[in-house]
Amino acid sequence: MQDEYLGLFTVMSFTALSIGSLLLSILTRSSKGNRAFAISMAVFSICIGLYVWMNLTEGGILAALFGALSLAIALWPRAKNPSDRETESQE
């Protein structure tokens, strides 16, 4: 009985960490901040989610999926500003 609660708490805590990683990726994407911490947090979320999924309970896949989504958001290239496009066309 306690093992079920331990697995549930582990899944909930690492899923919350992965959602935080997702929010950090969205924040760094929308601003001009450094994306290194968002990328490392997303990779950690994927690794820990896969570990929980393989060794503890199936719910760990949620953390891994949120981590993969946040990694994709963090690595997606930023769109250029319209002012940057105008200066390139003038050159």
Image: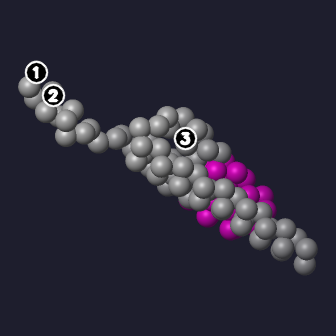
Looking at the rendered structure, the secondary structure element under dot 3 is: helix
Q: Which residue is mark 3?
A: 39
> In the displayed structure, would residue 64 be above or below residue 57?
above
Is label 2 in contact with label 3 (beta carbons under 8 Å)?
no
Mark 3 vs mark 1: give the one in front. 1
Q: Position of residue 36 (x, y in %)?
A: 54, 35
Read off the residue under disc 1. 91
The x, y position of residue 7, in whole percent, is 80, 68
Quarter of the image with the C terminus in it: top left
- Residue extent of the magenta highlight: 45-65
Image position of 81 with respect to 18: above or below: above
Tell me the amino acid under the disc marked 2: Thr
User: Residue at left 15%, top 28%?
Assistant: 87
Q: Amino acid at mark 1?
A: Glu
Identify the mark at residue 87; answer none if there is no mark.
Answer: 2
First along the sequence among labels 2 and 3: 3
How is the structure coloured here?
Answer: one colour
Mark 3 vs mark 1: which is more N-terminal? Answer: 3
Closer to us: 42 or 64: 42
How far apart are the alpha carbons under marks 2 and 3?
30 Å
Q: Amino acid at mark 3?
A: Ile
Please state the horizontal and vertical placement of residue 33, each as a whole percent of the image. Answer: 47, 37
Tell me, yes or no, if residue 68 can be seen here. no
Q: Where does residue 43 sit, x and y in percent of width and height?
A: 60, 44
Which part of the image, by quadrant, shows the N terminus?
Answer: bottom right
- Whether tag 2 and tag 1 are in contact, CB under 8 A, the answer is yes
Q: Is residue 9 above or below residue 29?
A: below
